[in-house]
Image: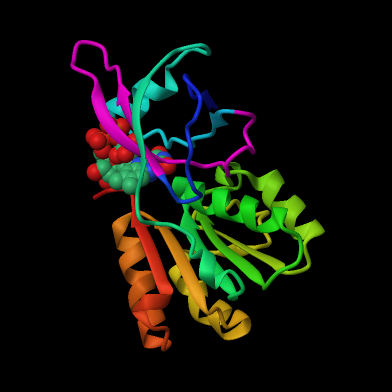
Amino acid sequence: VFEVAGGGFKYEPGHVIDLFVPVPGRLAMKRAYSIASAPGFAGPGALELAVTLVPDGPASTALHALEPGATLEADGPRGSFLRWPAERDQRTLFVATGSGLAPLRAMMQTEFARGDGPPVSLLFGCRTENDILWGTELRTWEARHSRFSLAVTLSRASSSWTGRRGWVQSHLVELVAVDAPERVFVCGLTPMVEEVRRILGTLGLPSSAVRTETFDT
Ligand SMILES: Cc1cc2nc3c(=O)[nH]c(=O)nc-3n(C[C@H](O)[C@H](O)[C@H](O)COP(=O)(O)OP(=O)(O)OC[C@H]3O[C@@H](n4cnc5c(N)ncnc54)[C@H](O)[C@@H]3O)c2cc1C
């Protein structure tokens, strides 16, 4: 959770900020992070980020080593992976893997804060039970909002996991058939995002209905 110094920082769910991450022995490294909280949800003037620890990744390693109270420089917000305010009443499917849930979580926080609305589904892929980011919040939404349906799939589940298994791609056809989304937001690493886009195309969703963000480009 970061507090933004100076005040007046405005953003929308889906926006990204660029952090200048101090890395020992090197110049600060500029890295993009999706804002994971809807405006106001992390406290006044604050925002949340979710950073995956990438093995041998200099910036993510340095961010995970930050002490509470550390100060970073940042640029932003920026980005085009935004909600469409004019199309708020469309059935929406969110598809994410890992920290790709970050911008979608900010969107869902905004969406559920307004109360009633169209159906919202989330297809979320993680490795193990321990990697289910914001699992408690997701389950709370599932219990509170009858219009929300949650499908978590694990690629390396333990033997006791009774839920879905495998990659998000394997569950897409079934969910689209059940939920009939009118728009889809997809976020994660390029191979998943491209494959999901391809499958959605074969299912007849127009490319204008699919918004994507990739973390490794
Ligand atoms: C628009 C945008 C938004 C982003 N938002 C986020 C975010 O909200 N959370 C986040 O953790 N990262 C996010 N990233 C990725 C982030 O900018 C860095 O690339 C990441 O933290 C790795 O940096 P690094 O210096 O540790 O490793 P690097 O040496 O720069 O990267 C090594 C490799 O790590 C892989 N990688 C990058 N991001 C991830 C990831 N999230 N999960 C698994 N593998 C990854 C890529 O294949 C990359 O080539 C975003 C990137 C973009 C372009």
Image coordinates for residue 141, horizontal then vertical, percent? 73, 55
Whole-percent x, y for residue 60 in the image: 35, 29
Point 46% across, 64% down: residue = 185
x, y (%) of residue 82?
44, 57
Q: Quadrant of the N terminus?
A: top right
Residue at left offset 63%, top offset 52%? 110
Q: Is residue 152 above or below residue 38?
A: below
**Vertical placement of residue 187 versus 131, above or below:** below
Residue at x 53%, y 64% (from the top left corner): 85
Above-or-below relation of 33 to 121: above
9 relative to 212 in the view: left or right = right
In the displayed image of the protein, which residue is found farthest to the right? 144
Observer-nearest residue: 156 or 216?
A: 216
Tell me where the magenta segment starts and ends, as one range: 16-44
In reply to whether residue 113 is colored magenta, the answer given is no
Q: Residue furthest left?
A: 26
Which residue sits at x=34%, y=70%? 195
